[in-house]
Amino acid sequence: MAARMSNSGLEFFVAAGQQQRGPFAVDRLLTEGVSAQTLVWREGMPSWQPAGTVSELAHIFVRPANAPPVPPMAMPVGYAGPAYGFAQSPVPTDVPSKKILAGLMGIFFGAWGVHRFVLGDVGGGFLRIVITFCTCGIGGFIGLIEGIIYLTKTDEEFYRMYMIEQRSWF
């Protein structure tokens, strides 16, 4: 059986999970997100193979020796960094202001749980109010301590602990 040909040469199918896409011309494979590890197949090949091992494709994965390093890719919101096996931890742009607001609200209005409401933890906010009432105000120091802790965390730590993991205490 002859290999399928396009105007620019051979065409390959690409494995995307349990599905296949294509066929795509060689010059379009990179725009389709194909990497050297992506499984590809074309007519005439006995089985699916990593694209980097296919002789007709190996040249598109070679980086010149003097090329600058590839910049890190932007990760989606919710990506939590090294603790989850990734190299970096991008933090959404609103996190530093939310950290400062939550910290200051914890210091000044911690007895009323305002800092927890800022973080979206409604139950934690109401719990701080109940503790304050049950301890005749002494429990309000919890908010003060939490506010100070928030402000001493790095943006990455704050984001991971209080927005991703949604830690309830300290």
Image: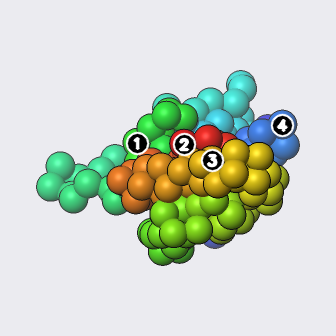
Residue 48 location, x and y as percent?
Answer: 69, 30
- Nearest the viewer among 106 and 130 is 130
**Would you say the residues marked 2 and 4 are in contact, meaning their CB atoms lie under 8 Å apart?**
no
Identify which residue is drawn at 69% across, 51% down. Answer: 136
Q: Does 157 sit above or below residue 112? A: above
The label nearer to you, 2 versus 4, is 2
Q: Does 75 sit above or below residue 105? A: above
First along the sequence among labels 3 and 1: 1
Residue identifier under label 3: 139
Residue 108 location, x and y as percent?
Answer: 51, 69
Residue identifier under label 1: 87
Q: SS class of the residue under badge 3?
A: helix
Residue identifier under label 4: 18
Question: How far apart, in angstroms, are the residues tagged by discs 3 and 4?
Answer: 55 Å
Tell me the kind of residue under disc 3: Gly
On residue 74, the disc is none
First along the sequence among labels 1 and 4: 4
Tell me the kind of residue under disc 4: Gln
Residue identifier under label 2: 170
First along the sequence among labels 1 and 2: 1
Identify which residue is drawn at 40% across, 42% down. Answer: 87
Question: How far apart, in angstroms, are the residues tagged by discs 3 and 2?
Answer: 14 Å
Residue 134 location, x and y as percent?
Answer: 77, 46
Estimate how packed mark 2 is, as few (under 14), some (14 to 19) or many (20 or more) residues with alpha carbons within 10 Å: few
- Asked if residue 71 can be seen in this view, the reply is yes
Quadrant of res 71: bottom left
Q: Quadrant of the N terminus?
A: top right
